[in-house]
Image (tube, grey):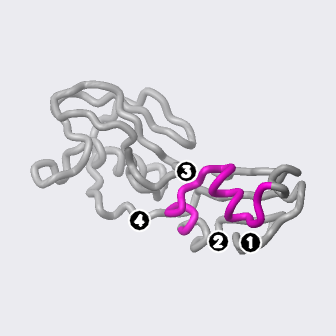
Amino acid sequence: MELRYIIKKEDKKNYETIHAIIRNTLQISNRLLTKLIKNNCITLNGSICDTRNSFETNDILKINLAYPEDNSNIVPTKMNLNIIYEDDWLLIVNKPAGIAIHPSILHYADSLSNGIKFYFDSIGLQKKIRPVNRLDFNTSRIGYFCKMCLHTRSI
């Protein structure tokens, strides 16, 4: 997944660096920005750029969010997932009652996140498991998981 942004005239007036555009206009968190820089995922006009540099109007800024992330902290467990919706950004599943969202001491390998990890592995997606909403163990509801997030923390 890639974000593409064409730098506007007002950006030149309001900001001095690529970093400022990414933080203020695209609202990417500092934590994610650090990862993007480390993984060479930010380009300006097709070349990897230093985000401390300036820019010109009509420059094309691209941010590649498809970099791999370590998700080895969750044990993959095969389970039947009732996937309601999926796109490049989001996975929505129907969470049955009696299943935890997060792994814990009591649910080390049988949480919904363990099933999502198995699913991500099966489709070759190396991304952290990021639940967007929290649901109690005994609650059956729709669970949302970010596949590509602009922020690196779960809500």
Which residue is denoted by mark 3 in the rendering? Answer: 150
- Does 28 lie within the magenta span? yes
* Callout 4 secondary element: loop
For the residues labelled 2 and 4, the Cα–Cα distance comes to: 17 Å
Residue type, label 4:
Asp
Which residue is denoted by mark 4 in the rendering? Answer: 70
Q: Main secondary structure of the magenta part?
A: helix
For the residues labelled 3 and 2, the Cα–Cα distance comes to: 16 Å
* Callout 3 secondary element: loop
Q: What stretch of residues is rendered in magenta?
A: 14-34
Viewer-closest of 75 and 7: 7
Residue type, label 1:
Ile
Q: Earlier in the sequence, mark 4 or mark 3?
A: 4
For the residues labelled 4 and 3, the Cα–Cα distance comes to: 17 Å
For the residues labelled 3 and 1, the Cα–Cα distance comes to: 19 Å
- Nearest to viewer (mark 4 / mark 3): 3
Q: Earlier in the sequence, mark 2 or mark 4?
A: 2
Q: Earlier in the sequence, mark 4 or mark 1?
A: 1
For the residues labelled 2 and 1, the Cα–Cα distance comes to: 6 Å
- Nearest to viewer (mark 3 / mark 2): 3
Mark 2 and mark 4 in contact? Answer it, CB < 8 Å. Answer: no
Residue at the image position 26 percent from the left and 49 percent from the top: 77
Viewer-closest of 78 and 154: 154
Q: Earlier in the sequence, mark 3 or mark 1?
A: 1
Residue 48, disc: 1
Mark 2 and mark 1 in contact? Answer it, CB < 8 Å. Answer: yes
